[in-house]
Amino acid sequence: MTAGESHGPALMVIVEGVPAGLALRADDIDRDLARRQRGYGRGGRMKIERDRVQIEAGVRGGETLGAPIALRVENRDFANWQGRMGAEVFERVPEPVRTPRPGHADLAGGLKYDRHDLRDILERASARETAARVAAGAVARALLAGVDVAVGSRVRAIAGVADDTEADARAWVRDGALRERLEASELRVLDDDAETRMKQAILEASHAGDTVGGVAEAAAVGLVPGLGSHVHWDRKLDGRLAQAALSIHAVKAVEIGDGWAAATLRGSSVHDAIGYDAAGRSFTRETNRAGGLEGGITTGEPLVVRAAMKPISTLRRALASVDVVTKESAPATVERSDICAVPAMGVVLEAMVALTLADALLEKFGGDSLGELLAHVARYRAHLAEY
Ligand code: EPS
């Protein structure tokens, strides 16, 4: 559970259920927080913040205790919002936000929570909250790394410009040249030419007072077959991943494996034929169009989830709106904002995938300590070889 407003004192998150004995350092979390802050097309806020985690509880001497882990990320910008944010009664009522932005939570949230200063909605609806998710996701990532699972992301498209570079997730998620290329790229892409054209589109949108969206892909490698389940709708891992991905700010569509494209093809060119590797005593696939999931269960192939982000709804050239008090037409509120946050969304998607997979892992294997969890996983791997 996260808490925190965009311009409040801090973002917080409590992560529950992590076994004892997992090595966890603030540096591991800060690395992901920094990755979330990057990307061509970000707004002024990222120049103010230097997101760093404070581990407040659940970790002692660099190892988890099995207790709830409490994390805090300070908002440096809070210093600039004295008298307008914070829990104390205001000395002077701050200027209210009264013209909702089409596409943001402003109007729907204002109606629902009966607030006429829409700042009461937008502060919590802001994508700033994803910093807390990324902090929590880094804890999940550390747990997954303990069972040799790695999660990464790449940007697939921005403003209609695609990076169609074919690359096996096993190659770009694990450390190596491709991963380094992704981390060095301002837009987290593999294709330099596509990156140039994407940046141009972002720049043009910026000049026009507009914003752009796109698609990011997250992949997890090293998974055992058997996480998730076919037996109930809410235990199917694809459904749970879709919920996790769609909960990210501005994400409007999710795709697993070949997703939408599979709907246009024949079954014979969609499903992944099965083979057997006698030496490795494991089942094999030459293709992975299913994106690592069949029947809501991991197959052991790379798990591939894509999320489509709409353009950010704060437009410098504002769309038409209505003052929620006077009901008169007025341009929508303009808050400082990003032009494009697709690379950051990819890092958030990694966090949501990691959290969902960590849940599924603990559900299947359990264990109060890391040692117990690893023993359960080892026994299951031995069963798979004997199957
Ligand atoms: C964000 C922080 C926010 C926005 C952005 C994401 O900070 P501020 O409102 O001070 O500029 O930049 O959120 C949105 C664009 C939005 O519409 O909510 C962050 O930390 O990622």
Image: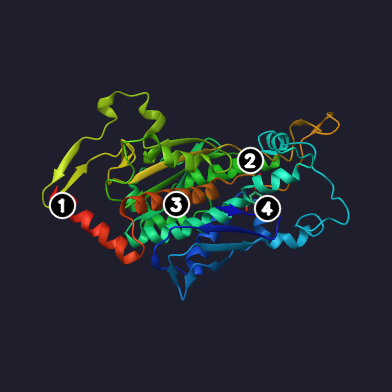
Q: How many marks?
A: 4
Mark 3: amino acid: Leu
Residue that appears at 67% across and 43% down: 206
| Earlier-in-chain disc, 3 versus 1 | 3
Q: Which is more foreground, mark 1 or mark 2?
A: 1
Nearer-the-camera pick, 162 or 7: 7
Classify mark 3: helix, strand or loop. helix
The residues bearing labels 4 and 1 have C-alpha atoms spaced at a distance of: 49 Å
| Earlier-in-chain disc, 1 versus 2 | 2
Classify mark 1: helix, strand or loop. helix
Q: Which residue is mark 4?
A: 6
The residues bearing labels 3 and 2 have C-alpha atoms spaced at a distance of: 25 Å
Q: Are marks 4 and 1 in contact (CB under 8 Å)?
A: no
The residues bearing labels 1 and 2 have C-alpha atoms spaced at a distance of: 48 Å
Residue that appears at 35% across and 50% down: 363
Q: Residue furthest right?
A: 92
Q: Which residue is mark 1?
A: 385
Q: Are marks 3 and 1 in contact (CB under 8 Å)?
A: no
Q: Are marks 3 and 2 in contact (CB under 8 Å)?
A: no
User: How busy is the neighbourhood of tag 3: few (under 14 within 10 Å), some, or many (20 plus)?
Assistant: many
